[in-house]
Amino acid sequence: MSRFDEAKKMYASLGVDAEAAIEQLKDVCISVHCWQGDDVGGFDSPEALSGGIQTTGNYPGKARTPAELMADIDKAFSLMPGKKKLNLHACYAIFDGAPAGRDQLEPKHFKAWVDYAKARNLGIDFNPTFFAHPMVKDNLTLSSPDETVRRYWVEHGKACIRISEYFAEETGVPCVMNIWIPDGYKDIPADRLGPRARFRKSLDEILSIPYDKTKVYVTLESKVFGIGLESYTVGSAEFCLSYSTKAGITPLMDNGHYHPTEVVSDKISSLLLFNEKIALHVTRPVRWDSDHVVLFDDETKEIAKEIVRNNALQRVFIATDYFDASINRISAWVTGVRNVQKALLFALLQPNDKLKALQDSADMTALMVLQEEMKTAPFGDVWDEYLRRENVPADYLSAVQDYEKKVLVNRV
């Protein structure tokens, strides 16, 4: 009997079908962020990264061109099991000729990405890029008191909705378009209401253009603070959740965008009660929104448990969002995405009905014991079987190191 057969037998004794767990995981799509490959550089602006975020490290091999980035994504995807989408930022526009401002972006500026995605049977998600640009004035975009600045970024948002609909129509897969702005102040502001009122007005104007809501899911992402924006963030959690409810769009939670003692896992059930869909950016904050590579850690597992035990795998858009320039970028991609998938499989292998019954019967002693026992269940054997069926190697480091020697070290 194989190790997987033994594991399957053990899980079956608790009422868990390991085969069914593997089959469910095969159908879960993870939206993989392109910006790990080039440290959020993009191709449309020479501006340094800004907006309260930064990438640290100078590991060799950063993608410098669209062709290099696409090749790196191909390599990373070949080492990831399961279904995937490509998640793009607007700053990854590819210009064939004269460049366009972000307020003038058109579908044609992303045709190369559509061709890439269609050749690989991928959907595309999208993000307007409200940072690293000369039109970010005094750390403000959609909330700026300068009407010229505010109007520029409103037009950018509208352009991105049109591009998102183009992605959906070309790939046949709905596009999740996420709005996040870095707007805020380093020190205590004299007016908190004004910037948020302008942000609300801007969002209303962006969403005023017609689009097919079965093809484009507009989401809104909050943040608690950023570097240089420590005292006030316009798009706070309360603002973004309230606006999403009012406008009928989808709330997005990034688990690095809250206070250090807050956890997104605790928020998922509340949002599921009041929203048809919700969206997540899965990252790993270390004392702040530092976008470290996702690990198979407690909060990642707890997020996955909340999705699975609430039967919400079809209601939650799951995307990754991190960027580490201190280690091999291909490895960072693969490690983080695999850990999201590991967490989902771990959640699918929990005896959730039995655990819930123990809670409802107030048998907290048995609940604690069973939860602790599940931590040492033979999960790894099921994960290895999943990788085998997906035809990806358990050891991906060797392939990454080989790619580094043959490709990445030549990028000087």
Image (cartoon, helix red, strand yellow):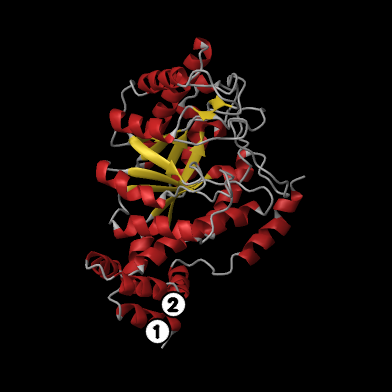
Q: On the image, which quarter does residue 15 sit in?
A: bottom left
Question: Decide: marks 2, 1 in contact (CB < 8 A)?
Answer: yes
Instruction: Tell me if residue 206 comes above or below residue 279 in the rendering.
Output: above
State the mark number for residue 373. none
Nearer the viewer's eye, disc 2 or disc 1? 2
Residue at the extreme bottom: 1
Write the residue at 49% across / 34% down: 111
Write the residue at 42% across / 42% down: 253
State the mark number for residue 6. 1
Q: On the image, which quarter does residue 91 sit in?
A: top right
Where disc 2 sits, the SS reads loop
Q: Which residue is mark 2?
A: 378
- Residue 312, given in percent of the width and then of the height, sits at 30, 53
- Residue 79, given in percent of the width and then of the height, sits at 54, 60
Dot placed on the residue nearer the N-terminal end, 2 or 1: 1
- Residue 287, given in percent of the width and then of the height, sits at 58, 47
Near mark 1 (Cα within 10 A), the count class, few <14, some 14-19 or many ≥20, is some
